[in-house]
Every structure is written in C-alpha cells, then in structure tokens.
Amino acid sequence: MQTPWYKQFWPWFLIFLPMCAVIGSFVTLGVFTKNSVDLVSEDYYKQGKGINVDLSKIHVAKGFKLQASVVSTPQGINVSLDKGKLSLYPALTITFTHRTLPDRDFARTLSSDANGNYRFNLPQPIQGPWFVKVEPHNKEWLIQGRVTFPTHTPTVLLD
C-alpha cells in the first residue's frame, strides 16, 4: 500500500524551496522599505538657486578671513573658530547633514568660550561622512566643508 503524498519527504522538500524564496523576498522588501535612501531633494530647484547665495556668503567669510575646524571628542564635537577680522566670537548655528540619511541631520546653536571653541555633547558618537555648515545667527557669512567622523585631528572647513 502506498503512503499519501503529504506523508512523504519529497513533496515537502519541493514545496520548502520556493517558500524560502518567497519569504526571503518579503524580508528583503521589508528591509528596503524601512531603510530607503533619499538621494534627490524635493526642492532641488530652490537649492540650486540657493547655491549662488551660499557662494556670496562664503566670499563674505573669506573677506573676514574666517576659518573653522572640527574635531570629535569622546563626549561630542568641538568646533574652533578663528575670528579673523571679527571683533568678537558670534553665536553660531552649526548644521550637520548626512548625505543619504536625512533623519540623522541635526543643528545646534552654540556660544563660544573665550578662545573661540564651540563644544556640545552627543548621546552617541557619529560616524561616517558628514557635511558641516557653520554660520552666525544673522546668517551673514557661511563656512562649510565635509568631515569624516570620528576625527582625532582638526579638519579645516574653509581654506
């Protein structure tokens, strides 16, 4: 007497292989939908027009002979500003932008100590390439550059 098909090994083995592929594709789909990459900005036209404004602000910073450098510490980030022709160290807005993960972007408004150091603590250290923008509260000038974290030596943002 022959046993029914559902009690044999080979039908279940042949069903198991396609089921693994189906389950794997759903898992892959779930991973990709949760970790999507935003490479194109929705307001790319406005950002393109804003490049000219940013360039004029960079020229103002060069006119003031400003320089900034960024270094990471175990507690957070330290930004040093060489004030050049400015009479005092202004309050700065420092923006950190990740190139592919916009949900990790953040900005801090900081005041300096007597030596022009702006420090802030982070709950966890940041890693990888970041675009850093440094500008005063009145947005008169702009210093920007790319920094790869963690960095133990100061990275100059504007030459």
Image (cartoon, helix red, strand yellow):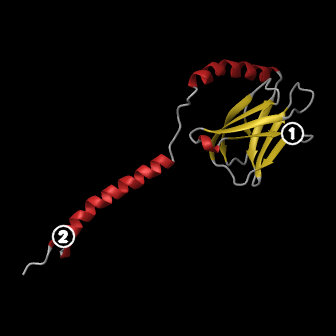
Q: Residue at x 87, y 40 (%)?
A: 112
Residue farthest to the left, as pictured: 1
C-alpha span from label 1 to label 2: 72 Å
Taking the image as shown, residue 108 lies to the left or right of residue 52, namely right
In the image, residue 13 sits, relative to residue 80, either above or below, namely below
Taking the image as shown, residue 121 lies to the left or right of residue 114, namely left
- Local crowd at mark 2 within 10 Å, few (<14), some, or many (≥20)? few
Q: Pointer 2: what residue?
A: 10
Quadrant for residue 64, please give it.
top right
Q: Amino acid at mark 1?
A: Ser
Q: Quadrant of the N terminus?
A: bottom left
Spot occupied by residue 16 in the image (x, y as percentages of width and height): 27, 65
Q: Residue at x 44, y 51 (%)?
A: 30
Quadrant for residue 70, please give it.
top right
Q: Amino acid at mark 2?
A: Trp
* Tag 1 secondary structure: loop
In the image, residue 118 sits, relative to residue 30, either above or below, namely above
Q: Which mark is residue 111?
A: 1
Quadrant for residue 86, please give it.
top right
Asked whether 99 or 82 is in front, the reply is 99
Q: Residue at x 75, y 55 (%)?
A: 74
Q: Can residue 159 be seen from the camera position used here?
A: no
Spot occupied by residue 59 in the image (x, y as percentages of width and height): 75, 20
Q: Quadrant of the C terminus?
A: top right
Q: Residue at x 63, y 44 (%)?
A: 104
Taking the image as shown, residue 16 lies to the left or right of residue 43, namely left
- Local crowd at mark 1 within 10 Å, few (<14), some, or many (≥20)? some
